[in-house]
Image (tube, rainbow, N blue to C red):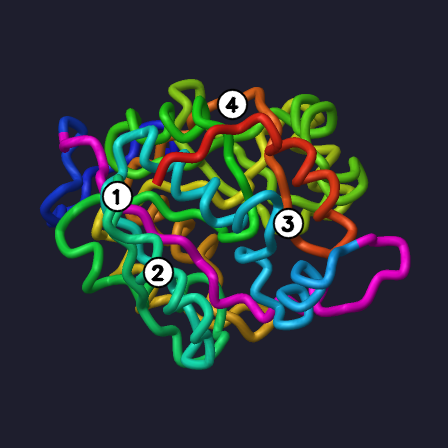
């Protein structure tokens, strides 16, 4: 199959047309175990409240002036999202309480349960009932994506992902260049449609794709077709159901996926050492829930 001229699927679910309404629903993947955040770091100066939340592994609720998730919800509301679903684990009472408390303003926040941490595709699948027949934005819970990147994503047709510029990530993020080097690489055709995406690229892949290849940081816009794809993939070599594998299946079967370019930074809240930099970067950001 020529990746530059995808063949339309025989049956396209509701909400997948290029002129579909702008998305008003978003899914935030918050089921992660927070292994890195739980690990004590003698160099990270956290206050008592921050340290207590960090020890729980629920990094999305770290207080950086206010809970980190407040900033994520606010920027989603800025780009037209009115309903958010947090995908959580059965044990995440703190996130259930947060969802209830955060609802009632610009966004309604609900939760969906991923029973076991079986991978990102399994986490997305847990939000199938929430998504219904609409397109949904899907994001990590431990990243803050700038408004311009999310606005461009929401304006894309069909399915899409943000392709982040490497130089901008290095210059404007709190993520070290060596970590960015391990992020997924995107191959696209001249029409900015996804051809392939490679998780944790090796040196040969980095050389083949080149330094200008866009980078994925898991900022997605999905049609309902993603849920069928999530149900049909096999576990990766890591033993997990990966959202990247579901997206690759969509592309192989002719679902166009637009790569939205963004020369911006992204804030990452993966470990205790990230808290101070994230707090400083968000200090001037207005939050409206």
Q: Nearer the viewer, mark 2 or mark 1?
A: 1
Residue name at image x 19 percent, y 39 percent:
8
- The residue identified by callout 4 is 262
Q: CA distance from mark 3 to mark 2?
A: 19 Å
Question: Does 222 lie within the magenta span?
Answer: no
Question: Measured from the top left, where is residue 255 in percent x and y?
Answer: 27, 42
Q: Which residue is mark 2?
A: 99
| Residue 65 figure quarter | top right
Q: Residue at x 65, y 31 (%)?
A: 281
- Counting residues from the start of the chain, the first of labels 2 and 4 encountered is 2
Segment tinted magenta in the rendering: 20-45
Q: CA distance from mark 1 to mark 3?
A: 25 Å
The residue lying toward the viewer, choosing from 91 and 7, is 91
Residue 189 appears in the figure: no
| Element on which disc 2 rests | helix
Residue designated by label 3? 269
Which quadrant is the N terminus positioned in? top left
Rounded to the nearest angstrom, the CA distance separating label 2 from label 1 is: 12 Å
Picture disc at residue 9: none
Quadrant location, the C terminus: top left
Q: Position of residue 262 (x, y in %)?
A: 51, 23
Front position in the image: 102 or 124: 102
Return the residue nearer the eye: 251 or 171: 171
């Amino acid at each position: 199959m020529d990746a530059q001229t995808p063949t339309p699927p025989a049956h396209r679910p509701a909400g997948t047309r290029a002129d579909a309404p702008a998305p008003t629903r978003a899914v935030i993947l918050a089921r992660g175990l927070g292994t890195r955040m739980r690990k004590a770091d003698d160099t990270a100066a956290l206050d008592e409240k921050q340290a207590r939340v960090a020890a729980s592994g629920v990094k999305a609720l770290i207080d950086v002036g206010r809970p980190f998730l407040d900033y994520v919800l606010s920027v989603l509301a800025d780009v037209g999202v009115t309903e958010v679903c947090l995908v959580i684990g059965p044990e995440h009472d703190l996130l259930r309480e947060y969802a209830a408390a955060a609802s009632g303003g610009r966004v309604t926040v609900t939760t969906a349960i991923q029973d076991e941490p079986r991978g990102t595709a399994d986490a997305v699948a847990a939000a199938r009932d929430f998504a219904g027949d609409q397109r949904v934005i899907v994001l990590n819970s431990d990243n803050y994506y700038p408004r311009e990147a999310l606005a461009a994503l929401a304006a894309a047709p069909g399915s899409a992902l943000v392709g982040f510029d490497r130089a901008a990530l290095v210059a404007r993020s709190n993520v070290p260049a060596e970590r960015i080097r391990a992020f997924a690489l995107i191959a696209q055709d001249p029409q900015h449609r996804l051809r392939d995406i490679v998780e944790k690229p090796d040196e040969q892949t980095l050389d083949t794709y080149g330094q200008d290849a866009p980078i994925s940081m898991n900022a997605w816009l999905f049609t309902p077709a993603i849920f069928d794809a999530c149900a049909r993939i096999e576990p990766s070599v890591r033993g997990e159901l990966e959202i990247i594998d579901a997206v690759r299946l969509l592309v192989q079967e002719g679902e166009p996926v637009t790569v939205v370019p963004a020369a911006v930074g992204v804030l990452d809240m993966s470990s205790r050492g990230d808290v101070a930099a994230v707090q400083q970067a968000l200090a001037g950001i207005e939050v409206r829930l």
